[in-house]
Image (tube, grey):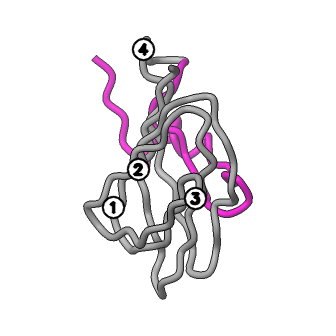
Amino acid sequence: MIVRNIKDKEVMDTSYIAHGGAIAQMILDMRTLKEIGFLATATLAPGRKIEEHIDPMEEIYFILSGSGEMQVDDEKRQVVVGDATWIPVGARHSLLNNAREDCIILVVASPA
């Protein structure tokens, strides 16, 4: 069994800027996981954006706190706490924090 906390050194040591906007940390990734690509958190400050990009994996963005405008291909939608957005492999996607508080998301990704 492996248990990781978002405050563990192994997680904090993975901090990086994700797609020009969010501060992200890998909770679990391919170094540990067998079938799932990764499990990560990302914090997006007010006015910041995870720039539009395409990933080679299927993803789910789950809003833990805050809100924002999610775009997947040509669809845009306001997302709030508790919303999960499925992003198919190869879909263009971005997330804009258009609120006044941090938007914190949980990201799950899996190879196709």
Q: Residue at x 42, y 38 (%)?
A: 108
Callout 4 amino acid = Glu
User: Looking at the image, which residue is at 66% across and 52% down?
Assistant: 18
Sequence-wise, the earlier of marks 1 and 2 is 1
Discs 1, 2 touching: Cβ within 8 Å:
yes
Q: CA distance from mark 4 to mark 1?
A: 24 Å
Spatial CA span between label 1 and label 2:
7 Å
Sequence-wise first label, 3 or 2: 3
> Which secondary structure, mark 2?
strand
In which quadrant of the rendered image does the N terminus lie?
top left
- In the image, is residue 64 above or below residue 107? below
Circle number at residue 64: 1
Residue marked by disc 2: 106
Q: Quadrant of residue 64?
A: bottom left
Instruction: Specify whether residue 50 is painted magenta.
Output: no
Q: Earlier in the sequence, mark 3 or mark 1?
A: 1
Label 3 residue SS: loop
Residue designated by label 3: 74
